[in-house]
């Protein structure tokens, strides 16, 4: 029998969540989770404290090292803030569709956080997935079906003269700003099509090796934790 993670909750947290939601939280994966306070990874089997943020009818659920924060309820924090706190790693990939090569960007939340309404027995919803759906992404259920929805955003890429480029997505309501490794063929594909596919999710890379593969994305799609949309790409003039 696999060892269960050591996930600890205060009496205040337990009273707020209730028995059925407590069972859901105890089953939540810790492999990709980071501490709410110090942002470092938490042990995949714990021990960790559960921290709940309450806003209106929703509750955000995150984890913390025992030495960083107690298990508590924070009523002044908005669950939507957990999206920004989670941070993001951006990886460029090349995939294939019926018409040829397809350029993809994968934005992986560094630390999963969960959200649920105050409904007895309600499921945990990944905060990053909920945020992406609100921003106009589609839920991806099969990786071989390219998302049809196009975001009203643009990815601006600044060529630094090496494989490391500067990427800015949606400056009006910043979605991502940082470095990304891009091969020349990735640029060729996006220049031909004018767009790429932007996928987002949490816990996408292999927790042991850190590798991000199409197989891992396919598994996330099957689990209902992958979102995607088409994104227009702008390159600097030569």
Image (cartoon, helix red, strand yellow):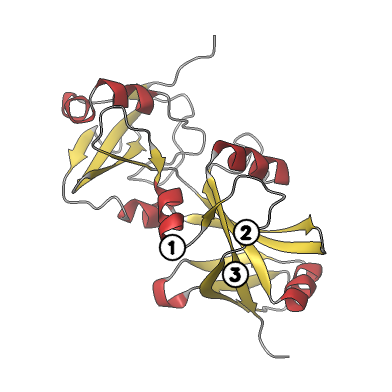
| Residue identified by numbered label 3 | 231
At numbered mark 1, what does the secondary structure look like: helix, strand or loop?
helix
**Label 3: element kind:** strand
- Quadrant occupied by the C terminus: bottom right
Crowding at dot 3, Cα within 10 Å, few <14 / some 14-19 / many 20+, comes out as: many
* Residue with the most extreme top position: 1
Q: Could you give the CA–CA distance between mark 2 and mark 1, rounded to whole angstroms?
A: 14 Å
Query: What is the x, y in percent for residue 109?
Result: 49, 50
Mark 2 or mark 1: whose residue is earlier in sequence: 1
Q: Which residue is drawn at 82% across and 64% down?
A: 99
How far apart are the two marked residues, 3 and 2, measured between alpha carbons?
10 Å
Q: How far apart are marks 1 and 3 (CA)?
A: 13 Å
Q: Position of residue 132 (x, y in %)?
A: 46, 56
Residue holding disc 1: 135
- Label 2: which residue? 147
**Picture layout, residue 164 above or below residue 94:** below
**Residue 164: image x %, image y %?**
67, 69
């Amino acid at each position: 029998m696999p060892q269960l993670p050591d996930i600890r909750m205060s009496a205040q947290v337990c009273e707020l969540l209730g028995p059925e939601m407590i069972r859901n939280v105890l089953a939540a994966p810790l492999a990709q989770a980071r501490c709410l306070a110090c942002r470092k990874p938490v042990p995949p089997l714990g021990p960790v404290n559960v921290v709940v943020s309450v806003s209106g009818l929703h509750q955000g659920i995150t984890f913390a090292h025992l030495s960083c924060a107690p298990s508590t309820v924070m009523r002044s924090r908005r669950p939507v803030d957990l999206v920004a706190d989670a941070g993001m790693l951006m990886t460029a990939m090349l995939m294939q569709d019926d018409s040829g090569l397809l350029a993809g960007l994968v934005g992986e939340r560094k630390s999963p956080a969960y959200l649920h309404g105050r409904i007895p027995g309600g499921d945990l919803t990944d905060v990053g997935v909920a945020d992406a759906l609100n921003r106009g992404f589609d839920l991806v259920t099969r990786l071989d079906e390219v998302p049809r929805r196009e975001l009203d955003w643009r990815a601006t890429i600044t060529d630094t003269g090496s494989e490391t480029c500067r990427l800015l997505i949606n400056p009006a309501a910043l979605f991502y700003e940082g470095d990304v490794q891009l091969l020349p063929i990735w640029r060729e594909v996006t220049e031909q099509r004018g767009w790429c596919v932007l996928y987002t999710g949490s816990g996408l890379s292999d927790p042991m090796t850190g590798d991000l593969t199409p197989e891992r994305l396919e598994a996330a799609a099957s689990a209902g934790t992958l979102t995607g949309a088409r994104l227009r790409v702008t390159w600097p003039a030569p």
